Image (tube, rainbow, N blue to C red):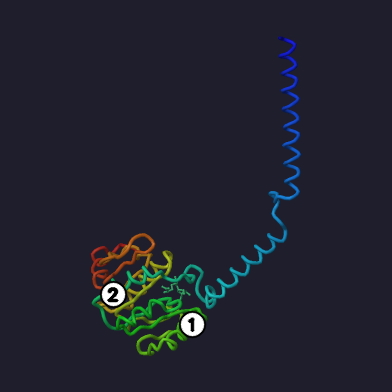
Amino acid sequence: MCVQAAECAVDEGAGKFAMEDSIEMILQEHGKVLPTNRPHPVLTACTGALLTGLYGVWSLFAIPGFRKVPWKLKVPYLPSSKDQTLNIMKLLEGRTGRLADLGSGDGRLVFAASSAGFQCTGYEINFILVAYARSKALWTGVPSNQATFVKKDFWKTDLSLYNNVTAFLAPGVMGVLGEKLLKELPDDARVIACRFPFPNWPHQSSVGSGLEESFAYDISTVRSHLKCAPNTVV
Ligand SMILES: C[S@@+](CC[C@H](N)C(=O)[O-])C[C@H]1O[C@@H](n2cnc3c(N)ncnc32)[C@H](O)[C@@H]1O
């Protein structure tokens, strides 16, 4: 009995080693044909080239004109979504007159507002986007008294002619923009901020939620609020 058990144990042990050996051999075999963890140099080179190309295309659209804008006021191009555009248009319901879109990108907000009857001007620093928006206006037959695209830095533009302003920019510039708008806009002006609200300004209403949210501000209300709280940093 004991001898038999010992023999079995020896047999079992030998079988286990034989199995491990054969598994190792199978793995080695597969190592020759299956991809290993090491990245393939051609694949790495192609991925690198693709990413560089994508960055090149993105920077072509996002960066031109930026050199002259101070670093802390730089805002890259990011088109607003359909929902964002709709939310902005809801906040402009009942309004008429002139509208300035600060950083008009490919012109989508300007086109939406001009078809709602506003006389719109899009200020855009990126000449490629300005050219695109102008040719789209030509192509779709939008007259220039309804939609104009100006290649200009809006920080250096007097906005006192506008009673409606839209801005989809960046959180870091909203405080400075607020100061500029309070200095220049008429009392009956309405400002719509897309996604990024003005710090310390009370909003009249907002539409949407999360990244799609837009905020409406009436300049007269903001001015009276800030008069009551004069120490508020805008
Ligand atoms: C976040 S994108 C919004 C584009 C567009 N309004 C939309 O909703 O799709 C901001 C735009 O502002 C432009 N921009 C940034 N700084 C500017 C400046 N100082 N003057 C004019 N345009 C500017 C950028 O080139 C970019 O196209």
The structure residue drawn at horizontal position 75% and vertical position 19%, both measured from the top left corner, is 10
Density class for disc 2 (Cα within 10 Å; few <14, some 14-19, many ≥20) is: many
Q: Position of residue 97 (x, y in %)?
A: 28, 83
The structure residue drawn at horizontal position 69% and vertical position 63%, both measured from the top left corner, is 45
The answer to which quarter of the image holds residue 182 is bottom left
The structure residue drawn at horizontal position 71% and vertical position 56%, both measured from the top left corner, is 40
Comparing 216 with 158, the one in front is 216
Density class for disc 1 (Cα within 10 Å; few <14, some 14-19, many ≥20) is: some
Q: Is mark 1 within 8 Å of ligand 1?
A: no
The structure residue drawn at horizontal position 35% and vertical position 83%, both measured from the top left corner, is 120
Residue 234 visible from this viewpoint: no
Q: Say which residue label 2 marks.
A: 92
The answer to which quarter of the image holds residue 148 is bottom left
Residue 166 visible from this viewpoint: yes
Q: Position of residue 96 (x, y in %)?
A: 26, 81
Q: Position of residue 135 (x, y in %)?
A: 47, 86
Secondary structure of the residue carrying tag 2 is: loop
Mark carried by residue 132: 1
Location of the N terminus by quadrant is top right
* Picture quadrant of ligand 1: bottom left
Front disc: 1 or 2: 1
Q: Is residue 21 above or below residue 233?
A: above
Identify which amino acid the numbered label 2 is placed on.
Answer: Leu
Q: Real-space Cα distance between discs 1 and 2?
A: 25 Å
Identify which amino acid the numbered label 1 is placed on.
Answer: Tyr
